Amino acid sequence: MQQRHHVLKLATRGKGLYEFTREVLDWVAGSGIRSGLLTLFVRHTSASLLVQENADPTVQADLERFLSRLVPDGDPIFTHRMEGPDDMSAHARAALTQVHLSIPLVDGNLALGTWQGIFLFEHRVDPMQRQVALHLLGE
Amino acid sequence: MQQRHHVLKLATRGKGLYEFTREVLDWVAGSGIRSGLLTLFVRHTSASLLVQENADPTVQADLERFLSRLVPDGDPIFTHRMEGPDDMSAHARAALTQVHLSIPLVDGNLALGTWQGIFLFEHRVDPMQRQVALHLLGE
Amino acid sequence: MQQRHHVLKLATRGKGLYEFTREVLDWVAGSGIRSGLLTLFVRHTSASLLVQENADPTVQADLERFLSRLVPDGDPIFTHRMEGPDDMSAHARAALTQVHLSIPLVDGNLALGTWQGIFLFEHRVDPMQRQVALHLLGE
């Protein structure tokens, strides 16, 4: 049993979903591990992770629109506004989605279904540099 | 340290929670591993996983009703309707719940609390065949 | 590769976020494991786990206020009221947040970002005793 660590750096340009399945698959393929457990952990509180459909891009646009309505920027209920109207709404959106993902690795393939992609969900308006810690344990 | 992989197949008949704690416990019991980490990963984007109370079935009905109101089928905000009015709402419901679960295994028992059961949360109206990838790592 | 199990006990005094990053770090530091994967699992269905900003306490107050509005106590949609108006809303709030967290451990440090703390999210009004199962796998 062995393990590998890595940090992926992802640049975002406003709210929405950014797929990075390819970057994850490439790192896993180069790890030499073919069976085990992959964990992804986003090192921020205003961005999150999501496994979602990557076939039709309207799914991603609809998810963003849905979250924007559910957690409105500048909601008067929020007192934390240090970095602007999208500051606290970003934290709440992150709280409703995932800070981490764990995906089994079987015979060299992640257990993702046919339509599943791995996304970073950006909740801030301004361009950001995001880090996702990767951990792979297996053999 | 050893690991085991498995895929559970579950049939659903409409939106709602389907408990499969028993199927998980049976597979773990037959694995020969008594201490470690169990991970479950649902291989779909319109169904999800949940650990919730399994004592009173009204909890499950209330959760379904709450999610149906929070994410209405056919919401005009959604443009992705390829498979009907419950298509995009299913993706949004899945995004708000869990695609994976990890539960420690201690002395042959999962660390579930007294009232905790493991559920598949189906978000589509039509009958579906769902797959949950299981991974157990331990000794 | 080795593993450790532990159960943290946390007392809560009403709804809201309770940080316990320090307790987790102390246990990890005493484990003798410096590289691996930490998993936390809350053994209840009316409390949950969250990684969120621990710098400004208004973030925590705003998150509580947001969840209280999104899932109102005593909502007439709920039929499960055995333990009062905050019973079923607690289950729904737990379903929308996390029952478990997994965080990589790298060179003796959890992969948490600068502003990330680990919180128990209490969803019940009355004082409660909560248990979080910890599992650490690594070397």
Image: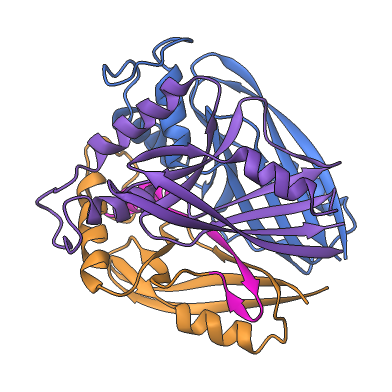
Chain colours: A orange, B purple, C blue
* Residue B75, horizontal then vertical, whole percent: 14, 48
Would residue A6 be seen by someone viewing this image from the given angle? yes
Is residue A94 something that shows in the picture?
no
Residue A110: within the magenta? Answer: yes
Relative vertical location of residue B46 with respect to residue A22 in this rendering, above or below = above
In the image, farthest residue toward the bottom? A30
Between A121 and B109, the one nearer to me in the picture? B109
What residue is shown at x 46% (from left), y 28% (from top)? C91
Please state if C5 lies on the left or on the right of B18 as rendered. right
Q: Please state, as top left, top right, bottom left or bottom right, where the N terminus of chain A lies in the image.
A: bottom right
C72 vs C44, left or right, is: left
Q: Residue at x 57, y 66 (%)?
A: A40
Q: Is residue B30 above or below residue A106?
A: above
- Tell me the residue at 26%/35% (across/down): A77
Q: Quadrant of residue A115?
A: bottom left
Q: Where residue C109 sits in the image (x, y, percent)?
A: 73, 62
- Which percent across, then down, holds residue C35? 79, 67
Residue A130 locus on image (x, y percent): 46, 72
- How many numbered marks appear? 0
Q: Tell me the quadrant of the picture where the C terminus of chain A can be found.
A: bottom right
- The vertical placement of C53 against A5, above or below, is above
The span shown in magenta is A86-111
Q: Residue at x 77, y 60 (%)?
A: B137
Q: Is residue A23 left or right of residue A16?
A: right
Residue A26 forms part of the magenta stretch = no
In the image, A22 versus B32, the foreground residue is B32
